[in-house]
Amino acid sequence: MTTVLLNRRRLLAAGGSVLVTGVSGLLLPAHAEGLAPTVSMAGGANNYRKGAAIVERIGKGGFWMSGTVRRAGDGAPLSGQRIQIWAHTVEGQEHEPHSHGATLTDKDGKFRLEMPQIIPIFGQPHGHLAYDSGEFKTVFLRPVMRSAKETSLEAHFVLQPA
Amino acid sequence: MRLARATLIWASLAAAVCVPIAAAAASPQLEWRGPVYIAAGFAGIVALGLVLVQPLLIGGYLPGLQAYRGRRAHHWIGGAIVVALVVHVAGLWITSPPDMVDALLFASPTLFSPFGVIAMWAIFAVALLASLRRRLGLRPRTWRNVHMLLAIVIVAGSVVHCLLIEGTMETVSKAALCVLVLAATIKIMIDLRVWRRRGESRREVIARQ
């Protein structure tokens, strides 16, 4: 009886380890291919207005939206990429044209745009960002602030060729 | 003594419903919202306040509105909840159509949306069944069971929906209202022996045979 029990135990242990390594290998293929592209977030494209102008600052400012743009796979920073930003702020609602603006990434793939303070809308204080310039696949992001009192928000893009 | 008790009960109910509304009316968020969005938000708060009144009426806990009068009031307030809900949804739709469409299609990024939408459908279902139950020939016990089940969905859905929202409502008065809604619902479920009655009536049927 003891030998049977031991055998069964060994079999379970061996089978378990095969399962763990096999399944995790199947679930994490991105490791082999490098940086995975960012997927658009639910509701990210809501109230989007195509072609917001590149601006120094949206409205009177006071709040900072920043982030990075990198290439999928090798993670190389992408410079000169146009990122569009909009939100419900103290100066206007999401859909209003003056709540929208765009900026370009610098040589390190970083962007930073000053805008009015974001306030909670539809139950969450959140911003909207879009990469929608054609060279890479379009991505819409909708980051949420941890608290409505925060005065900055970050969002990061990893783009794949269109 | 009786009058004092009645006054106390009505004053507590008025406070439970009106304090959260007053606190929301003092929210700094209102400054940056349009009138339609503000109306939609308050319609939601009013609806939750009325959801608190419903079990109290059916349980006969409100002095002056017991038995038949309580039931009549329960019907009218049910209608008022539907109206408040329509204002809530329509107002939010006007404020931001894509966000409302996402919510109604269960594609919203916010966790509270599906809870609200499920509660909404449960409220519409109760209202529809309540107005059609005689025409449909619904047996009183079937109606009662369906209504109780939908009432639980409405209360649980509304409370979770409300608690997860970061909006104009002040946190403490919001939580208090939600706890009262839950407490009133649990109390009436116990008082009316919602779950025991079924077994008892089955025993009655068996006894008759």
Image (cartoon, grey):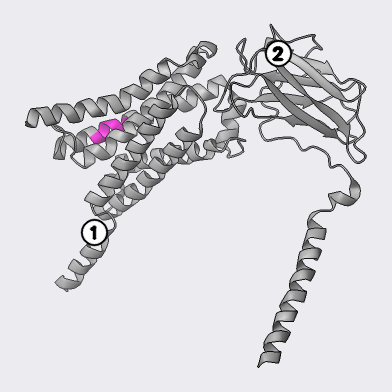
Label 1: which secondary element: helix
How packed is label 2: few (under 14 Cα within 10 Å), some, or many (20 or more)?
A: many
Front in this rendered view, residue B183 or B70:
B183
User: Which amino acid type is marked by label 1?
Assistant: Arg
How packed is label 1: few (under 14 Cα within 10 Å), some, or many (20 or more)?
A: few
The secondary structure that most of the magenta stretch takes on is helix
Q: Position of residue A154 (x, y in %)?
A: 73, 26
Q: Position of residue B132 (x, y in %)?
A: 31, 42
Q: Quadrant of residue B97?
A: top right
Whether residue B83 can be seen here = no
Q: Is residue A41 magenta?
A: no
Is A123 on the left-hand or right-hand side of A73? left
User: Which amino acid type is marked by label 2?
Assistant: Met
Image: A27 above or below A55: below
Front in this rendered view, residue A97 or A7:
A7
Asked if the residues shown at circle 2 and circle 1 are in contact, with their CB atoms under 8 angstroms apart, the answer is: no
Is A41 on the left-hand or right-hand side of B209? right
User: Given this view, does label 2 or label 1 mark the residue nearer the observer?
Assistant: 2
Judging from the image, mark 1 belongs to the subunit labelled: B
> Mark on residue A115?
2
- The residues bearing labels 2 and 1 have C-alpha atoms spaced at a distance of 61 Å
Query: What is the magenta range?
Result: B74-79
Q: Looking at the image, which residue sits at the far top? A: A60
Judging by the rendered image, the residue that carries numbered circle 1 is B197
- Residue, x 67% and y 35% (percent of image)? A42
User: Looking at the rendering, in which quadrant would you find the C terminus of chain B?
Assistant: bottom left
Whether residue B53 can be seen here = yes
